[in-house]
Amino acid sequence: MKFKKIFTHWKVILLLLFLVFALVAIKPSPWVEGVTIKSVAINSSAAQAGIENPTSQLSPLARERIISINGEKINSPADYYSKLTNLVENQTVYVVTNKQNYNFLSHTDNLGKIDLGIKVNEAPITNLRKGLDLAGGTRVLLKPTEKISASDLDILLETLKERLNVYGLADVVVRSSTDLSGDVYILIEMAGVTEDEVKELLAKQGKFEAKIGNETVFFGGKKDITYVCRSAECSGIDPSQGCYKISEGYACRFFFSITLSPEAAKRQGNLTSGLSVISETDGSYYLSQNLDLFLDDKQVDTLKIGSELKGKVTTDIQISGSGTGRTTEEASKVSLDNMKRLQAVIITGSLPVKLDVVKIDTISPVLGKEFLNNVLYVGLFVLIAVSGVVLIIYRKLKIVLPMVLILISEVVLVLGFAALVGWNLDLASIAGILIMVGTAVDHLIIITDETIKGEFVYDWKEKMKRAMIIVLTAYLTVCSGMIPLWFAGAGLLKGFAFTTIIGLSFGVLIARSAYAAIAEILLKE
């Protein structure tokens, strides 16, 4: 009879409905097959075949997954990369995903290795997004060197996202935040980028300019440059020069072709029409002035202009540069990294303002996995410990069991909301969940004490009213303390404040109210 009263009470029904919605949002799927596509390189064979680069807005389970390659099942990232070693250049590759089938030719990257242009991760089993602390990666906090308007801030965020996308990093978080003093910061979370690459790629303004003498031929960005080649056929280590010995090691030349807009090509034709032709000792002919390349007002390279380009309006030109190292392998890697950074800047153009690197945190995926395992173990231990203490105090299983179920339901509710809004769960968010569980235990004990030990002069409604007033007062106190943390630390504590406020709200307004109704039904004599 009491169980019927419990499951027909409107507060319990409301809790059950929210739990169903939370589970639908989380969508536990332990049977998921294959590996998830993390990114697809621009102009790669996979991209040309129609495989799309996933956006950060997609939920984890909605992302495309590779099920098999050439008929062989792919169960892990290790399987995928092992399969690539068995392929040869220009081999037809049949890729089956959870969305459709593709076939295209395999190609080598700039280092001569087979690369389909696809990076993969383990397939997620829920829609919960793991933040940097749990998944591993790099968190960068940037600050504009000058005040920035709202419109320029939007341009800045979009340009940074595009640079990371061009660099092969599509699944990133880029957002602005402010601290308590009103200063603007840019917070970026990503995987696979070193500290030096961050400083070169993100912190620099990236103003690219090509000049003949003192006259600008074209700037980096979509206005003057319509296409930048990034495939192995028209970019990489320059085969005509390759790597060569220098006094302090080795140097390697890179090259890649670009396509100018008609306006930029016309400027180049006009600027070269008045130049004279000079001959070199090897019998080749060039124009009297070079094409100088500048990055952030610093000359990074100079290119000779062939005599056949004098006054010619041509949209196809070749950019080159170099990199050095102690060995040819190191020089080749540095050269290709320089090429990728330059390509990213040329494609996206310059940032509205320069940025300073305030803080960089790097966490390995292995360490993130250990964090997650430790959190699960600690959560299980806390649940067992709380259950044991409550059982010792009240000596009634009918009190302990509802308490445990309510605690679990509160965690499910906040995780479901995080999955629904796409909130990344990091250590700050986990700390917020632990705070929520701690206050839940406190509030459930208050409700139980008021129910069992209340003075006999109070009726049941008065007992519940008194208990809920205490709970609501504590809830408002904690929430008011979380609001300043939302803006403190340039947004780094937002996950803690957000999870704590949302968790407490679900708990007080839904779960703990349901527990009060359950306690009244079970304990009322």
Image (cartoon, rainbow, N blue to C red):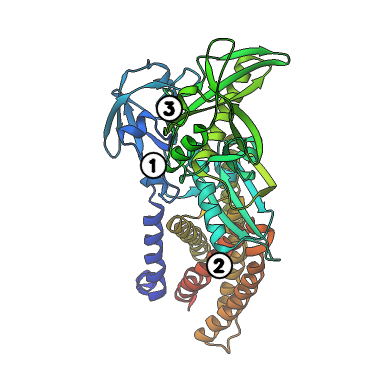
What is the x, y in percent for residue 129? 48, 49
What is the x, y in percent for residue 74? 37, 28
According to the picture, the residue beneath numbered tag 1 turns out to be 30
Identify the amino acid type marked 1: Pro
According to the picture, the residue beneath numbered tag 2 turns out to be 504
Precedes in sequence: disc 1 or disc 2: 1
Residue 325 can be seen, yes or no: yes
According to the picture, the residue beneath numbered tag 3 turns out to be 231
Q: CA distance from mark 2 to mark 3?
A: 51 Å
Give the class, few, some or many, for how many residues have Cα within 10 Å of label 1's Cα (few <14, many ≥20): few
Up the image or down, 7 lies above or below 426; here it is below
**Residue 338 or 316: which is nearer the viewer?**
316
Residue occupying the point 50% across, 67% down? 506
What is the x, y in percent for residue 328? 62, 14
Residue 226 can be seen, yes or no: no
- Per the image, label 1 sits on a secondary structure element best described as loop
Give the class, few, some or many, for how many residues have Cα within 10 Å of label 2's Cα (few <14, many ≥20): many
- Per the image, label 2 sits on a secondary structure element best described as helix
Q: CA distance from mark 1 to mark 3?
A: 37 Å
Identify the amino acid type marked 3: Ser
| 115 lies left or right of 333 | left
